Image (tube, grey):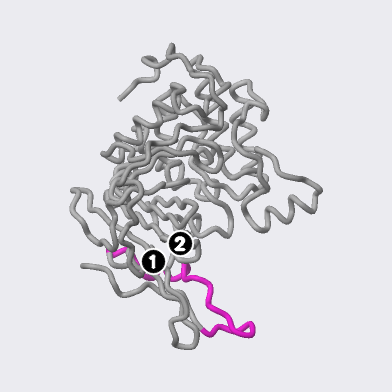
Amino acid sequence: MTHPKDTATMPVPEAPAHKAAAAPTTARSLKTPHHVPLVEVTRDGLVESIHYGSLIALHKNGSTAVEAGEPDAPMYPRSSLKPLQAVALLKAGLDIPQNLLALTAASHSGAQMHREGAAEILKLHGLTEAALGNSTDLPYGVAEREEWLRAGNGPTQIAQNCSGKHASMTAVCVINGWPVEGYLHPEHPLQVLVRDTITELTGEEAAAVSTDGCGTPLFAHSLHGMARAYGRIAAADENTDEGKVAHAMRRYPQMVAGEGRDVTALMRAVPGLLAKDGFEGLQLVGLPNGTGVAVKISDGGDRARMPVTVEVLRRLGVDGGSLDTLQSPPVLGGGLPVGELRAAQIFSN
């Protein structure tokens, strides 16, 4: 893997900071994955809607515990890559308090603690919000967004849900003497290190490269590879870079997402569990025994992530009682419960 010092003098191509080089179109990248039914939406006993997708759960030794669909098909992990990106930043010398490290791996709700945390990372390294290259947005959390708007605020980079990651990326540039300008270019030494770290953790080369919603280079990997990575991070010794990220996320789950968010609730409900979601229906989980779980909902439906993830965890023997608080909101009719979201019975054992 490329070491930060080996890339410190690497020239950075002149290109817009938010643009990533697209991968060549190939037959593989055009192939539609063979997704299967994962979640059913019922209304008074009738299945009204079905969410398709793929998933896999891997034991620490690499054997498959549960799978469905086509977990080896390449897909974009979106924000579920953030814990892997955070590992790369530690390798590059990032040294910040645990709550801010958890924020580095976050898709946060934009609460005051999140905004102040991102600003603190910048301040610690002599930077301001002007250094950030992420997109502007309103806070992601519903309550946080409403409060923000009532105060007369508009979209900003600090309020955007990836600001913690971007603040730490600019900090690493300062630490290593790399240019902050252009830090999102895929050939910037920071992004080369991130790419190599993701390859190492997943055990596979990226199938394609694009740009995430916040402007960061986005690497396509399989659910299989992502489950492997999360198992490795969750089981890592606390003194390793992987273990430091896992410990920070577990200790400060409210920084990884926010109050009222299912990822925060899941980590609080199951001691030692590591969880991160991603746009377009991604849910990743790592257990302290080294088991990794990766779920992709094919239509990107966020409501379907948790019902199928909870079912997989139950099949893995995770305490069922602790998961009861994570049941999906009921399907309503006239304001009253008339149905539910439930996992489809298609998993192999």
For the point 50% across and 60% down, the residue is 262
Residue 38, compared with residue 244, is above or below; it is below
Report the label total. 2
Mark drawn on residue 29: none
The magenta-colored residue range is 316-338
Separation (CA) of disc 2 from disc 1 = 7 Å
Q: Which residue is mark 2?
A: 299
Instruction: Decide: few, some or many residues near mark 2? Use Cα within 10 Å; few <14, some 14-19, many ≥20.
Output: few
Quadrant in the picture for residue 312: bottom left
Residue 168, compared with residue 278, is above or below; it is above
Quadrant in the picture for residue 293: bottom left
- Locate the C terminus by quadrant: bottom left
For the point 32% across and 48% down, the residue is 222
Residue 330 painted magenta: yes
Kindly identify the amino acid type of the residue bearing the numbered disc 2: Asp
Residue 134 painted magenta: no
Q: Closest to the observer: 92 or 244?
A: 92
Kindly identify the amino acid type of the residue bearing the numbered disc 1: Tyr
Residue 234 position, x and y percent, is 34, 46
92 left or right of 171 in image: left
Which is nearer the N-term, disc 2 or disc 1? 1
SS category of the residue bearing label 1: strand
Q: Which residue is mark 1?
A: 52
SS category of the residue bearing label 2: loop
- Locate the N terminus by quadrant: top left
Quadrant in the picture for residue 157: top right
Contact between marks 2 and 1 (CB within 8 A): the answer is yes
333 left or right of 247 in image: right
Residue 340 position, x and y percent, is 48, 78
Q: Closest to the observer: 150 or 198?
A: 198
